[in-house]
Amino acid sequence: MNVATPHDTTANEAQADPVVVALMQRFGEHAFVEQATLIGMPVLWVAREALVEMLSFLRGMPEPFEMLFDLSANDERLRGNRQGLPDSDFTVFYQLLSVSRNRDIMLKVALAESDLEMPSIVSLYPNANWYEREVWDMFGVVFHGHPHLTRILMPPTWIGHPLRKDHSARATEFDPYTLTVEGQDKEQAALKFDPEAWGMRRGNENSEFMFLNLGPNHPSAHGAFRIVLQLEGEEIVDCVPDIGYHHRGAEKMGERQSWHSYIPYTDRVDYTGGVMNNLPYILAVEKLAGITVTDRARTIRVMMAELFRISSHLLFLGTYLQDLGAMSPVFYSFSDRQKSYEVIEAITGFRMHPAWFRIGGVAQDLPKGWDRLMQGFVDWMPKRLHEYERAMMENSIVRERTRNVAAYSTQEALEWGVTGPNLRATGCNYDLRKKRPYSGYENFDFEVPLGGNGDAFDRGQVRIEEMRQSLRIIQQCIDHMPAGDYKADHPLTTPPPRDKMLQHIETLITHFLQVSWGPVLKPNESQQMIEATKGINSYYLTSDGNTMSYRTRIRTPSFPHLQQIPAVMRGGFVPDLIAHLGSIDFVMADVDR
């Protein structure tokens, strides 16, 4: 088992890595420059001309890097601390994940501002399609060979590339917004779907195809999501997902908020996940700060994260079955979800968005009686899950609507960047809580539920089983909650207790600076991946020695999950698409950020 550690990945360590050794043997020791980071994987700067060949080598080696986990960029022009790194105005990075090796590797390519061009890798990794579009949209990097390089998160009429450092970040930095009748007509025309631009025909020898907009206001679209269907009768010939209606610049906001004050913004990414969204961010910050968290704080985090996993899965289950035409389940699941929120509110003071985790621990200690409340919920849920299974998943109509519908294999899931329950429904036993334990998960006894067919039914069944395992983890937290402090005693990011602050002037100064200005973290890069409610979520942070992040990259699971829809649904039918959309379990804030 390869557990990510918080120390630097030095050049010597990277050279000892068998994958790096294999790359040296194949391409020579001068083919890349190694970067020491806190990311926890080899980070190699490679020449643009060698990128595709190197990725092909990693894709085809024994125990290959089957998944393009993330692809994004960084505007380096204002970064002051780049000692030892290649000259670069913009950097494009590729993070590859090998399930068979349980390892990652990151390749970086340096670009000059006057030459923002890259080769597309869609032929190697099909899920690179949307990631390359996002990099073009946000940074203006052109990918040659891309099948359809257009805006993806911003409107087609947008001017500029928002994640560049010279692009405005706040509404007050823009001219006042006005929309004339002429401007409205222009925006409406830009939204009109052009089949030919996507390589689609308007008909065949026998019939004329119909193009139908599903969303962005349809209830089964689960948010502001539009998917344009090319239909022959009820059969889906092809489809084009259209995202970005919920985009609000979550990564850009990270450049304007202190390390502490950005925590509430993470709650709003997967807004059904609550503190689960705080966890990868604060773990990445703690790597940068060199903080070791107490056992009590780690256990509290696990307990609350798993409680939110149950809450999120209950929301999924009710709306999923509602999409299939069952009206009652959503009322039952929301009633049980309310019971989880009563416990969450009693402990954190909030419900959906508590923003309760802190750098170094949690906001406050568990209140008196927390164990009684939590135990009541743990005792209540098992019989409810049994009832859901009996009345819903064993229902013949549900089975007919979901068995063998929108099925895909493990290989196809990895090619499209699918993670979490949707990957495990194919039978792939890959859960970061087991494979790369974080926050103390290695101390808990639980199983990883798996499916076998990778269809819509298995995706629902796996989540019911996951709720049972989450209850099992929470019970262990109740029974074995460690004593001690709920946050680390670390002056860099944890404000001193108020009673000490009122007695010592040095402590008062430290407290004032931490609250008003925030901590200053040394220049470095760190990343943390976690098994979130909908799949693997990660935060990749770049510190330039300031009170805020220089670059905050959020890799969400729902983004690649929606990209896979056309590959799964071609040749299917509209009712099957509705069942598939419900079985994915996504929220658009998690897609669009």
Image (cartoon, rainbow, N blue to C red):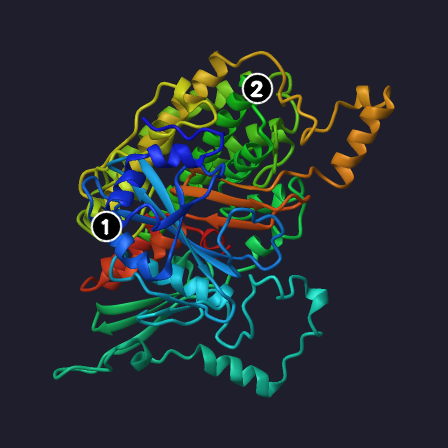
Residue visible at 64% across and 38% down in the picture:
521
311, above or below 79, in the image: above
Q: Is residue 343 left or right of residue 389?
A: right
Q: Amino acid at mark 2?
A: Thr
Q: Quadrant of the N terminus?
A: top left
| Residue 318 appears in the picture as rendered | yes
Q: Nearer the viewer, mark 2 or mark 1?
A: 1
Q: Residue 57: which disc?
A: 1
The alpha-carbon separation of the residues under discs 2 and 1 comes to 42 Å
**Could you tell me if residue 332 is visible in this image?**
no
Q: Nearer the viewer, residue 277 or 36?
A: 36
Relative image position of residue 186 (x, y in whole percent): 52, 84
Residue 66 pos. (x, y %): 25, 46
Q: Is residue 387 left or right of residue 478?
A: left
User: Counting residues from the N terminus, which is met first, the one under dot 2 or under dot 1?
Assistant: 1
Q: Quick check: 102 left or right of 71?
A: left
SS class, disc 1: helix
Label of residue 183 in the image: none
Q: Residue at x 56, y 49 (%)?
A: 82
In the picture, measured across the screen, residue 222 lies left or right of residue 462, that is right
Say which of 101 and 283 sits in front.
101
Front residue (pair 408, 16): 16
**Residue 294 bears which disc, if any?**
2
Task: Count numbered badges in the picture.
Answer: 2
Instruction: Locate residue 431: give its quadrant.
Output: top left
Q: Residue 450: name its quadrant.
A: top left
Three-letter amino acid code at the position of disc 1 = Phe
The spot of residue 199 in percent (x, y) is 27, 77
Question: Could you tell me which residue is drawn at 24 percent across and 73 percent down?
Answer: 231
